[in-house]
Amino acid sequence: MAKRSKRKSAGVTTSPVAEDLARGPLYFWLGVAAIVLAVFWVYSPSIAGGWLWDDDWYITQQPLVRNLGGLGKFWFAPGSWTEYYPLHETLIWIEWHLFGAATPGYHLVTITLHALNALLVWRLLERLGMGKAWLGGFLYAVHPVAVDSVAWIAETKNTLSTLPCLLAMIAWVDYENDRKPRDYTLALLYFTAAMLCKIAVVPLPVVFLLYAWWKRHRVGARDLAAVAPFLLIAIVLTAIDLGASEVYSHKPGNTPDSLPQLDLVSRIALSGQSIGVYFAHIVWPVGLLPNYPQWTIGTPSPLAFIPCLVVAAVFVVLWLRRASWGASAILGLGAFVLFLAPFTGLMVPSYMAFTWVMDHFLYLAIIGPIALFVAALDSIDNRVPAQWHIAVTGVATLVATLLAFEAHSYAGAFADEATLWGYTVEHNPGDWLAQDNVGKALLLQNQPEDAANHFRIALLLRPGRAQTHLNLGRSLVAMNHLDDGLAEYDTALTLNPTDPEIYNQKGVAFLQANRAAEAIAPLQRAVELRPHYAIGLENLGTALALTGRLGEAVEKFRASLDVNPNDVATHVNLGRALHQLGRNAEANDQFRQALQLDPDNAAAKAALAQP
């Protein structure tokens, strides 16, 4: 990376940004338009895409998203949710109240955030003095490893957190150049905002120290003092987030999939292997997947440490060349490794129950390698004759174009659950989670026999998983094999006796078999375990109403509406129970509310037409 350039003309100092603007506003706005249009074209296949994977867990089935009290809990009650990312959760809360369950609005927001991030990468590289900074922003905009973050709604926290993180980087570079307190304050505020979106940005203060070393070839007491407030914020917010996650994990029904048990030696071996895989995905982003095959770790052999040795050797060589190009390479690759460090295996996060690497962790880390690539092109331009400059630009343009088409194609896999997981199973049939998710998608498409086959494969690959037994039970019940389905539910409860969803599905099975009295006990247990479980409360109300316990049914329906006030079916069911109790005015009010939410609802219309 080049030092930030400053040229003096008639006593006036100009920066690279000013130089680009001096070429005329048309140059600048054409660059902006090209990046924005490229982003929206690349992700156009995902705009109409549905909810995926754990979008239901984070958004559609999350009671805190639906009511005003949830907004306060996101900020002031750590442990109410699995993470303490209050800025991200506030955005999701706002989106839910704007868009409801309609996904295009969510996709347009995260695509817009990605476009802004690409423009900020351009701006950051300009601040670092790179002549081809725009190309860096464009490469970031169209690189396929970003697809997981941009096309998957639950990962909006990546696109959201990266925006203030990039602003913090830009402000820090400005502070390093001019030492203005305003730039320092902005960097601190932006970093805090980024941490409140996702703690994956936590290595940024160390990256600042790395930048100080690159700029001055040393890290002094002044640098440490400047970074200290950032480190304090990072430590405090990380502790709050980890504490919130611990509190939430001990709530009933929140038992995660069991994690692999890896000793320190195994984790060190895995970290080197993961860094190699992640870097390979940046250099050759073809055939990317949501989940990759989980290679065997076990007791590492000496060969397992070769990637670690390669990484170490690279940095040793760069250190020996630090007086010239090595320093810039250390900055770019160092930032890459630092931002990836929490996700390489040194720690064992929850996703490692099914895969070692996930490309959405590259969303921020990729900026370092992109910066190195752009800096290398600048260096080539400076070394070759002028007539070769067009060839260099042409090769870079070809690379960017190929990346854009690959990303566009991959974004199409995120159209819906069936497409995404069918694509994953096709390329990674040994992925038990993908098999399970394909089954769930087929179940929603009313294909229970095909769904059951995928659930059975998932259980062969990952025996003893309660959620998969639950899903198999649902498919068997849908095939009218009630006893077999109930047996799967009982197996699931043996494995996870505090999961309210299993009790709820067991109750639903009894309701569908017209055995309402038997449905009451499991449904009561479901709402005991999760008091604000809207669908469980509604199903319990239905079971109570069918057994003549109308007063209790009314109470459960109202409790369900307190959590999810826009559920049409619950308004209709409450209206029917009130009508049976002779409270016709209240009943008609519920039917009218149902029609306000769904003007074509036949049940509400028929009920209001009755004398």
Image: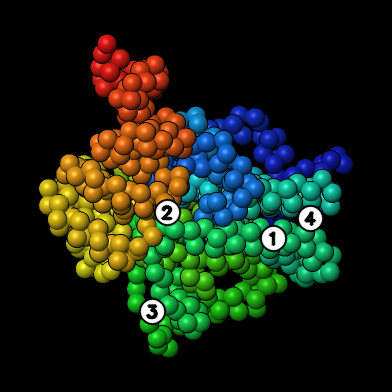
Query: Amino acid type of disc 3?
Result: Ile
* Residue tagged 4: 176
Query: Amino acid type of disc 4?
Result: Glu
The label number, if any, that marks residue 559 in the structure image: none
Q: Farthest residue in the right direction?
A: 11
Seen at 26% across and 69% down, the residue is 463
Seen at 20% across and 63% down, the residue is 457
Instruction: Give whichever of 179, 339 is nearer the camera.
Output: 339
Task: Say which of marks 1 and 4 sits in front.
Answer: 1
* Residue tagged 1: 236
* Residue tagged 3: 297
Query: Amino acid type of disc 1?
Result: Val
Seen at 72% across and 62% down, the residue is 231
- Regarding mark 3 in the picture, which secondary structure is present there? loop
Sequence-wise, the earlier of marks 4 and 2 is: 4
Count up the numbered dots. Answer: 4
Sequence-wise, the earlier of marks 1 and 4 is: 4
Task: Say which of marks 2 and 3 sits in front.
Answer: 2
Task: Say which of marks 4 and 2 sits in front.
Answer: 2
- Regarding mark 2 in the picture, which secondary structure is present there? helix
In-image side of 39 versus 567 (left or right) = right
In-image side of 411 versus 138 (left or right) = left
Q: CA distance from mark 1 to mark 2?
A: 31 Å
Instruction: Give whichever of 576, 248 is nearer the camera.
Output: 576
